[in-house]
Image: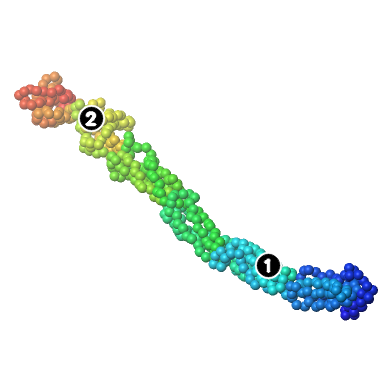
Amino acid sequence: MRTVVVAVAAALTALVSAGAAHADVTITPVCNGSPCSTGWYTANVTVSFTVQNFTGTLGNCGPYQVSSDTSDYAASCSVQIDASTTVTKTVHVKRDATPPTATAITTARAPDANGWYNHAVDVSVSGSDATSGIASCTTTTYSGPDSSSASVSGTCRDGAGNVSAPQTLSLKYDATPPSIDAAAARAPDANDWYNHPVGVAFTGSDATSGIGSCTSGAYSGPDNVGATVSGTCQDNAGNVATRAFGLQYDATPPTVTGGTPDRPPDAGDWYNHRVVITFAGTDGASGIASCDAVPYEKPDSTAATVSGSCVDKAGNTSAPGSFKLAYDSTPPSLSSLSAAVGAGGVTLAWKASHDVASLRVTRAAGAGGPTPLYSGKPIASLVDRDVRNGVQYAYTVTAHDAAGNAVTRNVVAVPLPPLIAPRREAHLRGAPTLRWRPVENATYYNVQIRLRGQKILTTWPASTSLHVAAALRPGRYVWAVWPGFGPRTKHRYGALIGTSAFVVTR
């Protein structure tokens, strides 16, 4: 290089000697072999000059070594043309080979919760440079992935283009809400329904920052097939997850709407044997699950009450409902049934209790079916005049009360002729004993016996029999009896009781 400079100096001397004009001198600076730049150099710079078309004396024109950082290194080259004229060229060189320093890296805002970021955060780097100054520093945004030790790096660039060593920032980042579960504090009361207040606990899990807290709740109404209890869990980064716990709630008992018997009354409005009352109800939320079916069979009452309840699907039980009915399962009383055989027929008599509502009397004779004699309101006696002597009659008296309960009594009677013995046309010996049926209120009787139309005996016994003291001679005798009333002296006789005949053989 020095040889080139000497050559240039010799040439310049030759030119001066040749008397070159001042205006033809050209001085050109060269940096590292290329035209010098006004920008920054980041390595050592060698500055030299080329001079053309000059006369005179060449001054100090380098070369110059720029090996230190500087913002203004001035390198000059001068040509003295004559005693009063010098041409000088100066070039200014900037060198910065030292990278800047990234002095800090910071986030644009504070953490969201507990030192954690839960949404995108800007991170910026700041720095310093002693020579060319800071031109720019990195600004970036961190938005994931979630990590408890996320890392963000950035650099600064100086005016010369040197880049600093990276500055690194560690941060905790979690933008993902936690998982959340909900569970009731107890099982449903019935059929997946709750019927009184229930607590709900919310629990969660978080893979990155962990769970910070969860809420709890409770439900106590109103009744709803789609009730919900809402709760949240928050992780340590401040992310919140929400969940609604669904349940069916019915705390209101159903209402009994009435009862229905399983059959109609037995008689009128009366029941006289077991009846089952099935209750029905309504429920505004969960609906009716079941209602009582209650049997009734005692005690007897004109206003018996059957109570029953309903249960809804949530397990609530209604207040009892009632059903009233008339119930009587006790038959009436029918006693002292008698059948008195008399001249006027068969007189039936009985005693019936006051609750008898109707009576029915039938008669059966031999193998024949029953013949109705009476059906109607209660009576205490009945005379059957349509009978024949010697025929056995079976009488049935049935008493019904208003509830349809019945009691039946039976009695048998065989009507005999008014004159009982001896039987008509009987053959006998000696003195007969005569017997006849009594007549009510009779105080004595007149008995007459005739043989061939001639009265052979008349007497007035007080009883209903007469023994003929003297033996009668053979023959056919006819006898008759009349009742007498009051003193015999009054001669008050009733209708003929009857006549009959017998034969005395010897």
Query: Residue at label 1?
Result: 137
Where is residue 107 shown, x and y percent of the image? 61, 66
10 Å neighbourhood of mark 1: few (<14), some, or many (≥20)? many
325 w.r.t. 223: above or below: above
At 90% from the left and 72% from the top, the residue drawn is 54
* Quadrant of the rendered image containing residue 51: bottom right
96 w.r.t. 393: above or below: below
Q: Nearer the viewer, residue 367 or 83?
A: 83
Question: Can residue 283 be seen from the camera position used here?
Answer: yes
69 w.r.t. 287: above or below: below
In the visual, does 100 lie left or right of 34?
A: left
Where is residue 14 shown, x and y percent of the image? 94, 76
**Amino acid type indicated by mark 2:** Leu
Q: Quadrant of the N terminus?
A: bottom right
Where is residue 395 shown, x and y percent of the image? 27, 33
Q: Which mark is residue 382?
A: 2
- Tag 1, which secondary structure? strand
328 w.r.t. 2: above or below: above
In the visual, does 125 lie left or right of 402?
A: right
At 74% from the left and 74% from the top, the residue drawn is 70
Q: Nearer the viewer, residue 265 or 253?
A: 253
Q: Quadrant of the C terminus?
A: top left
10 Å neighbourhood of mark 2: few (<14), some, or many (≥20)? some
In the visual, does 305 lie left or right of 144?
A: left
Q: CA distance from mark 2 to mark 1?
A: 134 Å
N-terminal-most mark, 2 or 1 = 1
Q: Nearer the viewer, residue 130 or 463?
A: 130
- Mark nearer the viewer, 2 or 1: 1
Q: Which mark is residue 370?
A: none
